[in-house]
Image (cartoon, rainbow, N blue to C red):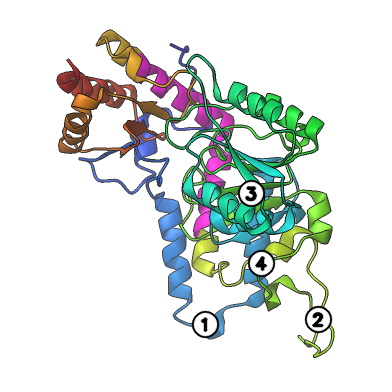
Amino acid sequence: MPERVDSPAIPATAHAARALFDLPADVLHLDCAARCPRLRSALAAGCDALQSDVAPWRLDEATWLASIERVRTRVAALLGDVADGIALVPSVAYGLATAARNLPLARGDAVLVEETSFPSNLLTWQQRCAEVGARLVVARRRPGTDAADAMLAAFDANPRIRIVAIAPTHWVDGALLDLDRIAARAQAAGAALVLDLRQSLGVLPVQIARWQPAFVVSVGHKWLLGPGGLAYLWAAPAWREQGHAIEQHWSARAPDDGWHFADDVPPSLRAGARRFDAGGVATSQALMMADAGMAQVQGWGADNIASRLGMLTATLDAALDAHGLDAWSTPRHAPHLVGLVPPANCFGRAVAALRAGGIICTARYGRLRIAPHLHVDDADMQRVADVLASVGR
């Protein structure tokens, strides 16, 4: 188990961290891969914004526009880039659809996805392939191999792969994908890389310069501790200059000082990835909550969050091992997300026992997805293992 080294940037105890979240005392929320518990600071910011909307005549447009750019800048900092690269969109699905509209794909070409991709990724590329007569290639892992091996084997078998759409942390079980190997192969093949960071941004580092993706997407309501309905799209520099948005609306344009839209020629697009901004998503309430959530993530530091959460999941792994259940845990999983695979004959009882104990997690694909945040401590992880041991013997 990793040596415990606490950073002054994050609360010294889970009790101190728990006080920052709006959580009832009798619930152990381990479902942050679905939605993190609400930060009190984000809740307060959302309430303040909602209260301000009661008197819309007092709202200042310059302040609203500045809040959009502040959120854009926070997302860019987490990605190691500049605000010009970020678009505000309603969902990862919307961002993926934008990537699919822009990336070239022809009849006979192929799009590579991982096994058990999240539905919005799978469905997006299924539709795009059907539209142009391309093929969807699914990299299926063989026993004893990891997902990166399967991806590289898919490249060997399919020389016409033009797009690779993957997530570095698998949403079902937390398995980590070696993006250095995949990205290098994609670059060598001239394939565009599309990254879904919904289960990693805010915890794991991002290497944009090394991986050279064409597009990157993430939600804001998981590890960024923000609200639902606001997500983010990063576009590579070339697409910031030539990409086409899904929709056309005034806020992606730069009209003259008189806010004049001519009948014959539209105003120029705003700089950078702002051309991909979706209409109607940048509400004051969503912006304020997103800003508060990411401010807390940046204050703690993603590296510090990953270190603390890695200690927690290591505690869970060790506790399962002590109960003889070590085979249940996903090998080489992310520090903040692990999938447990009970035997099929006790899966239902395991789910029921966890729920009866007030332990909240996702049960899907025969796995229990355990995804803690800083409000959780080692005793909580031991408690999970003890409950599972009571039904797994």
Residue 242 spot, x, y in % from top left: 82, 60
For disc 3, the marked residue is 75
Residue type, mark 2 in image: Pro
Q: Residue at x 52, y 44 (%)?
A: 296
Front tag of 3 and 4: 4
As measured in the structure, the alpha-carbon distance from the residue carrying label 3 to the one carrying label 2 is: 29 Å
For disc 4, the marked residue is 246
Q: Is the magenta stretch mostly helix, strand or loop?
A: helix
Residue 147 spot, x, y in % from top left: 56, 25
**What is the number of the mark on residue 56?**
1
- Find residue 163 and report its image quarter: top right
Residue 158 spot, x, y in % from top left: 69, 33
Above or below residue 279? Residue 16 is above
Q: Which residue is drawn at 41% across and 57% down?
A: 43
**Kind of element beneath mark 4:** loop
Above or below residue 302? Residue 276 is below
Residue type, mark 4 in image: Ile
Start and end of the magenta stretch? 289-317
Q: Earlier in the sequence, mark 2 or mark 4?
A: 4
**Camera-side residue: 266 or 77?**
266
